[in-house]
Amino acid sequence: MPLQMKRLALALAISAAATPACAFDAFVTNEKGNSVSVIDTETLTVKKTIPVSQRPRGIVVSPDNKRIYVALGDSDTIAVIDPQTYAVVEDFPAGRDPERVDISPDGKTLYVTNEDSNFLTFFDAATKERIGGVRVGVEPEGLAVSPDGKLIVATTETTNMAHFVDAAKRKTLANVLVDARPRMAAFTPDGAEVWVSAEIGGDVVIVDSATFKIKDRVKFEVPGLRSENVQPVGINISRDGKLAFVSLGPANRIAVVDVKTRQVLKYLLVGQRVWHAAFTPDEKYLLTTNGISNDVSVIDVAAQKVVKSIQVGESPWDLAIPGAPKP
């Protein structure tokens, strides 16, 4: 091997050895703790706690992984965190009671569901100025952006609808009546379907994103639990589109669902009152926020097994991991 090639191989080997295989931080919003816990997902320990303003809930990472946006419901603002320094670098007005925040694939536009004003609001991510909005139903919460960035879905808890909005025209294309109290929406990786969790309805409604027609439902029956305790909230679909992991709230379980067949393959016992979850970028782990037990459960995705519980702040609600697939 030529000397130059040997040097290159040695440099690559040193670089690989110096880089941890799973050096990702998870940012967890603690709704009642008014903080964001930072978990090192290599050591599975809390490495930092970031104080923020009142009632942090929804959280999203910018596509370039340089900024983290946190919706602060009782402060009516969005906090911007630098994931390298763990500092809150900005805090800007976001309208009444921002519940969830999401971002366009190009990183230029922020979307916010304002629960008290029944609005889906658009912000310029660079200037933080409000650039538009669409009136939706009562108590908007769930928010999802299609993989191509053309479609936005907002779910409204009291109206029981999923609202499909054209991102470019800022115009509602369809209002789809789903089941009772829809909490979250998630696109499949190909963008063909939108999965909507119905907390009181106790199921996930699957909507065709082209026709806006309901095409299927996923039902949940957890042995030993009453049906009213099975309340779907968060939805996370694997990057290959094969598995969906659904957070079942006070059932304290994550349901593992075959996306193609719609069959529940397994129920995983996690902490108390599981809200949301996020994959690590390599999809080795799925981390869940458990609002009553104040912890994060770590699921080994391949083994479909909970491997650890990590104590965080008070009432963990949502989380985001730079570089990971979005819900």
Image (tube, rainbow, N blue to C red):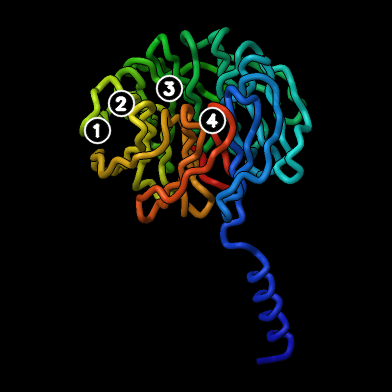
Residue type, label 3 = Arg
Q: How many neighbours does mark 4 have within 10 angstroms: few (below 14), some (14-19), or many (20 or more)?
A: many
Task: Please identify the quarter of the rendering in which residue 63 is found.
Answer: top right
Element on which disc 3 rests: strand
Q: CA distance from mark 3 to mark 1?
A: 20 Å
Residue 38, x across and y down, in percent: 63, 41
Task: Please identify the quarter of the rendering in which residue 186 is found.
Answer: top left
24 left or right, relative to 310? right
Q: Are marks 2 and 4 in contact (CB under 8 Å)?
A: no
Residue on which the image places disc 1: 222
Residue 176, x across and y down, in percent: 36, 17
Q: CA distance from mark 2 to mark 1?
A: 7 Å
Q: Are marks 4 and 1 in contact (CB under 8 Å)?
A: no
Residue on which the image places disc 4: 316
Q: CA distance from mark 2 to mark 4?
A: 19 Å
Residue on which the image places disc 2: 230
Q: Are marks 3 and 1 in contact (CB under 8 Å)?
A: no
Element on which disc 4 rests: strand
Task: Please identify the quarter of the rendering in which residue 56 is found.
Answer: top right
Element on which disc 1 rests: loop
Residue type, label 2 = Val
Residue on which the image places disc 3: 183
| Of the pair 24 and 177, the residue shown nearer to us | 24
Q: CA distance from mark 2 to mark 3?
A: 13 Å
Q: How many neighbours does mark 2 have within 10 angstroms: few (below 14), some (14-19), or many (20 or more)?
A: many
What residue appears at the point 70 percent right and 38 percent down from the top-left corner? 67
Q: Quadrant of the N terminus?
A: bottom right
Does residue 183 lie above or below 18 as drawn?
above
Lower position in the chain sequence, tag 4 or tag 1: 1
Q: CA distance from mark 4 to mark 1?
A: 24 Å
Residue type, label 4 = Pro
